[in-house]
Image (cartoon, grey):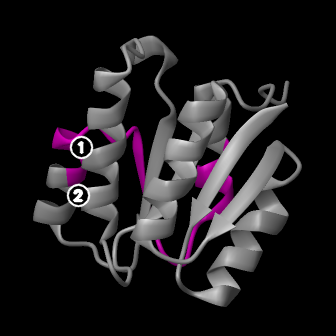
Amino acid sequence: MKRILIVEDDMVSRKFLSKFLSRYGDCDLVVDGLEAIDAYLLTLKDGLPYDLICLDVMMPKIDGIRVLKTVRDLERQNGIAENEACKIIITTVLGETQIVQTAFDYGCNAYASKPIDMTKLTAVLEKFGFIEAMV
């Protein structure tokens, strides 16, 4: 079973993503960037890191871009190979090119603008190997 972390401060978005993604794996939910880093560190310690992180950009305490950079730094420090690193999808209402470019520079795997298009998200999950492509 895949392990998924949903990092979202908006309750409606969090519940929506959880309901959708729970069919593809076990979902943990956190409401800010600090909780996200703590949750990721716990999974590293357990030796069972997340397979997927859905990460909102605009959050309290620590924003999604800093969480993304921290997760990638922790993966490198712990010798996690790039092909074994968790997939990270950045979600935001912001469409600013610079934020998206920075996210990709730090190693995000995909970007979804809100409201999230479920068809596009499903296609991304297929590309990541989370779901079988519908034939």
Identity of the amino acid at label 1?
A: Phe
Is residue 33 on the magenta stretch? no
For the point 42% across and 16% down, which residue is it?
80
Foreground pick, 55 / 125: 55
State left or right for residue 99 relative to residue 26.
left
Residue located farthest toward the left when viewing the structure as drawn? 98
Q: Is residue 33 visible?
A: yes
Residue hosting label 1 = 104
* Badge 2 amino acid: Val
- Image quarter where the C terminus lies is top right
Position above or below: 85 against 20: above
**Crowd class of label 1 (few under 14; some 14 to 19; many from 20; radius 10 Å):** some
Q: Position of residue 25 (x, y in %)?
A: 82, 42
- Residue 116 lies in the magenta stretch: yes
77 versus 50 height, above or below = above
- Seen in the image, is 77 located left or right of residue 87? left
Give the mark count: 2
Q: Which residue is mark 2?
A: 100
Mark 2 and mark 1 in contact (Cβ < 8 Å)? yes
